[in-house]
Image (spheres, rainbow, N blue to C red):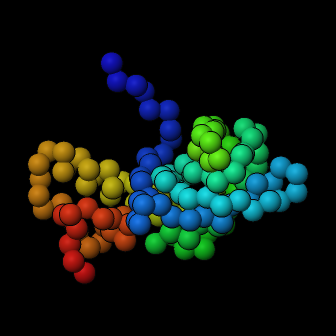
Amino acid sequence: MLKAEKRGHKRFPVLKDMAEPVDLFVMDSGAREVPAVLTNLSAGGMALVVFAHVSGEAKLKLMLDVHGLEGIELQGRVAWTAPKGDTTGVGVKFDHMKKETVDKINAMAEDFQDCELKLSFGVKDVCFLKCAYFTLCSKPVKLKK
């Protein structure tokens, strides 16, 4: 039996050079900057690996600087944590986001999901230059610019 998807937005991986660094500020007792990398993203939230302890109720502020999504300031809260040694896997639920940012992230997620589906059916000619996910893609089928 398949597990029902609870998320309202499709996610896509952010794996260019393995993960993208994020300027993350934990707003628990004051604002402390902690090192983190982004592993996946949707218009509703993201997953991070944080190189510090983060509590389950913390408010977060971060600057997103991913290819195609440069200089976007976001606010959210911790949705889940998974501590592992000196790092913490953190799920973030965004509080609000500009419509144009939502649209851009959703387009990237749609194009990523469409490509994955086509590849799963053995389609070889799946890449196109106007793909919203193109700048993050590292698949072997990716077209050269």
Q: Is residue 121 visible?
A: yes
Across and down, in percent, residue 7 comes to 50, 38
Q: On the rendered structure, is 88 left or right of 11? A: right
Q: Residue at x 30, y 65 (%)?
A: 138
Across and down, in percent, residue 88 comes to 63, 45
Q: Which residue lies furthest to the top in this view?
A: 1
Across and down, in percent, residue 124 comes to 11, 58
Q: Residue at x 42, y 61 (%)?
A: 18
Q: Residue furthest bottom?
A: 145
State which quadrant residue 133 falls in.
bottom left
Q: Residue furthest front?
A: 85
State which quadrant residue 63 falls in.
bottom right
Q: Is residue 100 visible?
A: no
Q: On the rendered structure, is 15 left or right of 95? A: left
- Considering depth in this image, is 134 or 18 the residue closer to the camera? 18
Number of labels in the image equals 0
Q: Residue furthest right?
A: 29
Q: Residue at x 65, y 61 (%)?
A: 35
Quadrant where the N terminus is found in the figure: top left
Q: On the rendered structure, is 79 left or right of 16? A: right
Relative to 49, is 64 above or below?
Answer: below
Q: On the rendered structure, is 74 left or right of 46? A: right
- Considering depth in this image, is 61 or 16 the residue closer to the camera? 16
Across and down, in percent, residue 137 comes to 33, 65
Relative to 124, is 59 above or below?
Answer: above
- Considering depth in this image, is 39 or 8 the residue closer to the camera? 39
Q: Which residue is drawn at 49% across and 54% down?
A: 39
